[in-house]
Image (cartoon, rainbow, N blue to C red):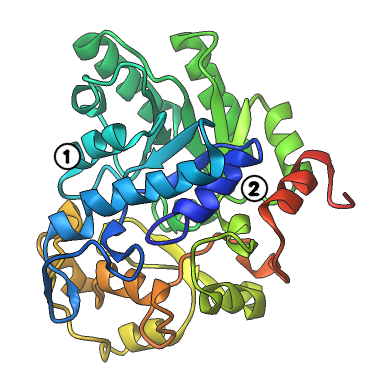
């Protein structure tokens, strides 16, 4: 769940309560108010080694372990980032039991995790074709297959694996994708589990996804509405106050459509009057060292970090299509109980 949303408090508590807490490896240098950062420029983390800060990542895992003990923890690592191979190894060394990777096809993921054979590898896909390509490459080159797969539909927060038009096309919605991806997974291995994601909100959504063949679900946005979520109160209150029409798809330097809340930043970007674009952190490959950032009108590393530093005017606040449904904060324990047993529990 991106910069600062799912770090030690949220991930540790989710795992403590029986889910799989997933630590975001993105922007870790901002953890604990940049405590582990040595180099900054223009008030930003200087370079990929600071933006994907190894010491901070280890601290996040250590702090999460203090909450959940030996319960499994995952790390989410965008394939599109600079230093992907290094961050995969860092996450394994920090203590991740499972690695989840989206934003591109992680064809070489097993190579970077080769020294950690007990770490499960889970790609995120948006189609059966993507799963087939990944599994074929892994089998041929590394003699292994994915340990699980996340199928993410076009209602999720953050970056989508679809074109802008596909995000609104009924044929590309999650409920249409589960069966063919599950069928592809079974052709690879009858026991390969598929976890549905993107727009999952409540107990009924989970039941429907599993009736369609999913083994379980991955959820993000609804957990922002918990006391334990690592984002500051400003971020949570923004979602509590927003309406359905304020959550929209926007252009991103990553090259995919992204879903977030329409804030002052979007107005600045649309009029090309936004903050200066300097590409200090050099965070993602597709941005081409700021070229795409200048094309779309904002630096994604700077704007996501502004969000977790409570800067409403210039922050980019990612959320899934159901983010407006958050109307109050719950504890993780309360939320998981509702998800398992229904909203009246």
Residue bearing the label numbered 1: 86
Instruction: Identify the image quadrant of the N terminus.
Output: bottom left
Rendering coords of residue 168 (x, y %): 53, 56
- Between circles 2 and 1, the one closer to the viewer is 1
- Asked whether residue 225 appears in the rendered view, the answer is yes
283, above or below 172, in the image: below
217 displayed left or right of 37: right
197 displayed left or right of 2: right
Front one among 178 and 226: 226
Rendering coords of residue 313 (x, y %): 40, 88
Rendering coords of residue 167 (x, y %): 49, 54
Rendering coords of residue 157 (x, y %): 49, 58
Q: Residues within 10 Å of mark 2 (few under 14, many from 20)?
A: many
Front one among 251 and 220: 220
Q: Earlier in the sequence, mark 2 or mark 1?
A: 1
Residue bearing the label numbered 2: 200
170, above or below 290, in the image: above
As drawn, which residue projects farthest toward the front? 66
Please report the residue visible at 11 percent of the width from the left and 59 percent of the height from the top. 288
46 displayed left or right of 130: left
24, above or below 340, in the image: below
Front one among 295 and 166: 295
Residue 122's disc number? none
Q: CA distance from mark 2 to mark 1?
A: 32 Å
Please report the residue visible at 64 percent of the width from the left and 47 percent of the height from the top. 200
Q: Residues within 10 Å of mark 1 (few under 14, many from 20)?
A: some
Please report the residue visible at 24 percent of the width from the left and 78 percent of the height from the top. 297
Q: Secondary structure at mark 1?
A: helix
Please report the residue visible at 30 percent of the width from the left and 46 percent of the height from the top. 58
329 displayed left or right of 75: right
Q: Secondary structure at mark 2?
A: loop
């Amino acid at each position: 769940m991106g910069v600062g949303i799912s770090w030690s408090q949220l991930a540790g508590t989710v795992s403590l309560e029986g889910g799989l807490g997933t630590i975001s490896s993105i922007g870790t240098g901002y953890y604990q108010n940049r405590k582990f950062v040595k180099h900054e420029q223009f008030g930003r983390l200087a370079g990929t080694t600071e933006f994907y800060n190894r010491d901070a990542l280890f601290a996040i895992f250590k702090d999460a372990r203090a909450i959940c003990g030996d319960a499994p923890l995952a790390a989410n690592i965008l394939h599109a980032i600079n230093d992907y191979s290094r961050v995969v190894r860092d996450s394994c060394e920090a203590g991740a039991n499972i690695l989840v990777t989206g934003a591109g096809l992680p064809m070489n993921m097993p190579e970077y995790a080769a020294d950690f054979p007990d770490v499960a590898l889970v790609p995120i896909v948006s189609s059966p074709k993507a799963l087939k390509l990944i599994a074929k490459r892994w089998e041929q080159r590394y003699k292994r297959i994915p340990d699980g797969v996340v199928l993410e539909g076009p209602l999720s927060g953050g970056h989508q694996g679809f074109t802008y038009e596909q995000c609104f096309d009924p044929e590309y919605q999650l409920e249409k994708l589960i069966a063919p991806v599950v069928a592809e997974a079974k052709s690879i291995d009858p026991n390969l589990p598929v976890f549905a994601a993107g727009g999952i909100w409540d107990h009924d959504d989970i039941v429907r996804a599993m009736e369609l063949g999913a083994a379980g679900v991955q959820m993000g946005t609804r957990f922002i509405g918990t006391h334990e979520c690592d984002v500051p109160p400003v971020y949570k209150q923004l979602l509590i106050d927003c309406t359905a029409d304020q959550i929209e798809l926007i252009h991103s330097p990553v090259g995919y459509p992204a879903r977030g809340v329409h804030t002052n930043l979007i107005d600045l970007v649309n009029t090309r009057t936004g903050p200066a674009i300097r590409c200090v952190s050099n965070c993602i490959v597709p941005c081409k060292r700021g070229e795409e950032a200048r094309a779309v009108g904002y630096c994604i590393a700077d704007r996501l970090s502004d969000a977790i530093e409570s800067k409403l005017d210039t922050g980019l606040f990612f959320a899934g299509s159901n983010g407006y449904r958050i109307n109050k904060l719950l504890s993780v324990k309360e939320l998981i109980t509702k998800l398992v047993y229904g909203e009246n529990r």
